[in-house]
Amino acid sequence: MLPIPDRSSITQEIQASITLTIPLAASQLAQAATGFVDTIIMGWLGPNTLAAGGLGAAIFMTCYVGGLGIITGVIPLIAQAHGAQNKPRIRQLTAQGLWLSLFIAIPVMWLLTRAEIIMQWIGQSPAITQPAQTYLNILTGAYFPAIAFIMLRGVVSSIGAPRAPMVIALGGLSFNIIANYVLAFGKLGFPALGLQGVAIASVMNYWGIFLALLLYIFWHRQLKHYHLFAKLKELNLPLLRELLHLGLPIGVSFTTEAGLFSVTTFLMGLISTEILAAHQIVFQTTAIIFMVPLGMSYATTIRVGQWLGSNDHTGIARSAYVGMFLSVSFMLLMATGILLFPTAVIGLYLDLSQPDNAALIPIVSPLLRVAALSLILDGVQTTAAGALRGLQDTKIPMFLSFTAFWIIGLGSGYILGFRLGWGGVGLWSGQAIGVATAALLFVSRFRRLLGQQRARKLSEGVV
């Protein structure tokens, strides 16, 4: 058994985790809000524009999530190197992380410029696919800076400067709101570019936040001492392979989880248009809330990685369980609010004074109740997954993620939703079962690895 940390150690870990979580979560929320703003502007441009832009954005985000997962593999290695006070390795990892971002971006950008073939193959009409492809042709330019920003955010957060990416991301959100409106509708003397204007604003935003973070790294007094870009001209193939070995399973896991929600959305549409509309309300609500525990997950990865670098197994356990506790506490608070005020949540999306919209309340409310339970479980699984990434354990969690989300979650959702006739509630219940399974598997995996490390430490005669 691991020794029980004293009360002051737990308090200090809570303070350190919150200090790291707030800027990471705020950055995640800012980036999620950017997509939300894009969707609102698309809706103002008309239903056809919303359909085309929404389809293009969904394709871009699927590719983005996969790239984000791969590049996330840099974070635990940086955190471990920082914990071991190994500045040369931090420089090497930063340089190869930027190279990896570029190598991921090149093939993905090529695929995005040919997405119309896939859209037509799945039966979308040319009236939608053509403007969606035009939108993607422009938005493709945002892919590299989008994932490179996340990589650099992980670097500076791991070595003690997490607030700058938050401020930059919030500034990017403000710019995106203004640029979207000006370019889409032709304000301040600019031509009205419609959906293309939305794409241009996004490209400018992502390049802006990436370049701003680069400048901050060069300017910041503490970060300058790391000389983070000193090794940028060197292509280190063994280190790139190490990053891919760690990051590729994370990318698959991220895509697996996101894919479950995408397939569930498709299945909701097979039930009825009303169920699909209700699902979109619930999904958008939970997606925004999830950004906070996702930030906590990144913070947990960093804290566990730092303790791993310091060879402090008590610190590893403490940071992981504190992260889970904070995440579950936040999600419990959000779930309580949803359960107590479901109509207020629905009213954020719909004018409930309209009879047609008010008729959706009894459809949305039961979905919200299931989603509230799922949020609490999600708080456990995402931080437990973050702790495993901190231990640089990604391959086995990839298989566990596939099993939990696609076999158990999707399978049970299909049975409950269609075979037993529970409809949308059944599909959301399946998602909750998948999330619960993932939480159980990830926590069990973490406890097992921690026990193995403790036993190995004792066998070496180290207390």
Image: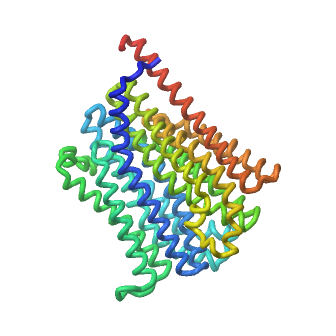
- Which sits in the foreground, 20 or 235? 20
Considering depth in this image, is 435 or 368 the residue closer to the camera? Answer: 368
- The answer to whether residue 308 is visible is no
Task: Indicate left or right for 297 with 401 as reference.
Answer: left
- Which residue appears at 61% of the width and 62% of the height? 343
The image shows residue 31 at horizontal and vertical percentages of 43, 60
Residue 165 higher or lower than 395, as above or below: below
Residue 26 percent coordinates (x, y): 39, 54
Q: Quadrant of residue 323?
A: top left
Residue closer to the observer: 167 or 55: 167
Position in image of residue 302 (x %, y %): 38, 39
The answer to whether residue 146 of the structure is visible from this angle is yes
Q: Is residue 263 left or right of residue 242?
A: right
For the image, the number of numbered tags is 0
Nearest to the observer: residue 132 or residue 18: 18
Report the coloring of the rendering: rainbow
Q: Position of residue 247 (x, y in %)?
A: 46, 43
Residue 230 higher or lower than 194, as above or below: above
**What residue is rendered at 75% in x and 50% in y?**
414
332 relative to 281, above or below: above
**Which residue appears at 18% of the width and 45% of the height?**
225
Is residue 220 toward the left or the right of residue 102 in the image? left
Quarter of the image with the C terminus in it: top left
